[in-house]
Amino acid sequence: MGLREDSVWNEIVSSCAELASFNARDIKRQLEYAGVTLVEGYAKFDDNSDRGSHHLVISNEDDDGKTTTTTTTISTDKILIATGSRPFRPSGIPFDGVRVFDSDSINGLNYLPKSVVITGSGIVAIEFAKIFSNLGCDDVTLLIRDNSPKNALMKIGLDKDIAATLVADLIRSGIKIERGCEVGTIEVPSSSAMASATAANAYNNQNRIVPLKISLKAKGGGSDRRLSSVHEIKCDAYVAAVGRLPNTNNLNLEAAGIEVDEYGGIAVDNLFRANGVKDRNVYGAGDVLGRPFLASTGVAQGVAAVKNMFPPSNPLDNDTSAIIDSACDPNDESCALEDDLLSQAAGVNPTTLTANPFAFPVGIWSSPEAAYFGLSTKQAEILGIDAGEGIALYAECLRGLVFSPNGLLKLVFQKSTGRIVGVHICGDDACELIHYGMELVKNRRTITDVANSLYSAVTFHEMYRIAAISCMDPKAARKSRAAVGRALTERRRNSSKQ
């Protein structure tokens, strides 16, 4: 007798909650060990104009049958705002946290749906699509506004071949992709219909629920969706994964004179000081500044902001120049440009962070994983860099062939110097492998350096050397990849016959 499906799902939910709780407790322990006083509650700037940007009002709500609100006022010299972000919720979607979710509330899902529809073409949407598919959801559908899922991924920075590999994997996994569309309406079953269905399913010993009905329309709300396209989808659950917004709407920022953008993101200078504040004593870090909404960049910005708030006594503690090798040909304009971008990246400059390809590595925790750092050939071309590229397939190294043959690693290099300016990976452990690639770019290593390096046998890192050799002899490399591809296809064919 096998395990009941709901038992497995409950174990998954329980494990996720346990991990989240452990992480929260660990953060609180770190604050305690650092001597930080923790005050829990909802904070906002004081409405009293005389107090300006130096006073916060903290409120606490206790729900014990009746709601009691207590408030405390804190006075301080400096303030760091790091309140994170929340999912963007498109208008007209009946979010209820039961059948219709955003990318945060989906964590409260208490059943494994047989079918799920996800709106979004970015990293989070793809991650959720693969999560549900891998957990055994029979029918997963992605709704994207773009007519090409590959182009949609390229718009958020992915290399063309990495984007194509991810899309191919989605299709191979049985995930459906509806292009050029968005949600029109969502019809949620009434409570009486749900109750009737529950009784019927219990009688027939089935685990089914009345489906949602989602009508689709052309992107932008137009009526020109092709007749041959899908116009209605039925599913158990719906998820909107269409971006995030800074959590600043309840902070009463206007009382401190803090300037925000159209999405509520705090506008800061290169020292992370909030614009518009008379005393320049308020700082911001992380998601409250807007994109890229990554934990890693949020932490780095927090560290940089605190150093600016309380400058270290030793100037070397705040010196980032050692991160960049200044041995650059003064006549090489592209090298000077790279120097400037790397310098800004080292300081996590908030004013240029999202536009700087050298600011941070990006990881996509799907299966397979994908990650990149630095320039793609298209970005290099825009910057005036004559770049080439070399590719290594996972199946070209022994570990990849045995354990994970689907995937690739790509090096982008400047043709005149051989200097590596970008690394792009799709496959197992891509989010780990990218950090070695990041160091190659930052330290201006060349394809010759990598080709002449010794890597341990039966490791994914061997792909770096294979890709570097591919840069040097692209014709031979194409023949090698073609031969590996044919062998892999034959191997799959034989396996399917057994």
Image (cartoon, rainbow, N blue to C red):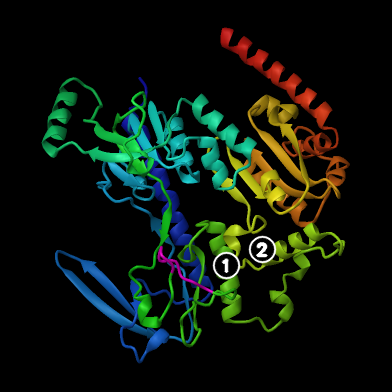
Find the distance from the CA under tag 1 to the CA under tag 2. 9 Å
Marks 1 and 2 close (CB-CB < 8 Å) = no
Q: Residue at x 52, y 56 (%)?
A: 294
Above or below, comparing residue 431 to residue 22 in the picture: above
Label 1, on which residue?
350
The residues colored magenta run: 261-268
Quadrant of res 476: top right
Q: Residue at x 78, y 63 (%)?
A: 336
184 within the magenta span: no
How would you rate the neighbour count of disc 1 (Cα within 10 Å): few for under 14, some for 14-19, many for 20 or more? many
Q: Residue at x 38, y 27 (%)?
A: 139
* Amino acid type, label 2: Ala
Above or below, comparing residue 227 to residue 440 in the picture: above
Residue 81 image position (x, y, % from top left): 45, 72
The answer to whether one can see residue 153 in this image is yes
Residue 82 image position (x, y, % from top left): 46, 68
Label 2, on which residue?
345
Q: Quadrant of the C terminus?
A: top right
Q: Secondary structure under badge 1?
A: loop
